[in-house]
Amino acid sequence: MRLRKIVVNYLLGWFALDLISTMPTSILEDAVKAAGAEVASGGANKLVRILRLPRLYRLARLMRLVKVLKLLRYNTNVIAMMNALNLSD
């Protein structure tokens, strides 16, 4: 079944990054700081900053999607197809 293949592909690919990026950063920071007693203070701070990267990645993906949607909005072929399917506003 195609749906099963899509789900497995997502779970093996982007799921981990999406899961980490949806977690509140305060929880991750507290966990790193608690483990930071064993790590040098500079290393713990660097790890906290790295944990914020997934949020930036999701923001970049969203910005790219908005850019593509803006390009499609003014594409005459897309407008004609939307009118043919009665999808326009």
Image (cartoon, grey):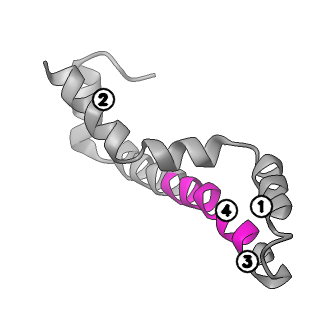
Residue 17 lies, with reference to residue 49, above or below; the image says: above
Magenta span covers which residues? 47-61
Which residue is painted at 29% across and 35% down in the image?
A: 79
The span from disc 3 to disc 4 (Cα, nearest Å) is 9 Å
The span from disc 3 to disc 1 (Cα, nearest Å) is 10 Å
Which residue is painted at 60% across and 47% down in the image?
A: 20
In the picture of the structure, the residue carrying the numbered disc 2 is: 7
Residue 30, quarter of the rendered image = bottom right
Which residue is painted at 78% across and 73% down in the image?
A: 44
Of callouts 3 and 1, the N-terminal one: 1
In the picture of the structure, the residue carrying the numbered disc 3 is: 46
The span from disc 2 to disc 1 (Cα, nearest Å) is 31 Å
Q: Which mark is residue 51?
A: 4
Q: Secondary structure at mark 4?
A: helix
The span from disc 2 to disc 3 (Cα, nearest Å) is 33 Å
Residue 71, x across and y down, in percent: 38, 53
Amino acid type of disc 3? Lys
Q: Are marks 1 and 4 in contact (CB under 8 Å)?
A: yes
Task: Please tell me whether the stretch drawn in magenta is mainly helix, strand or loop.
Answer: helix
Residue 21 lies, with reference to residue 9, above or below; the image says: below
Residue 49, quarter of the rendered image = bottom right
Nearest the eye: 65 or 46: 46
The span from disc 4 to disc 2 (Cα, nearest Å) is 25 Å
Q: Which mark is residue 32?
A: 1
> Is residue 37 highlighted in magenta?
no
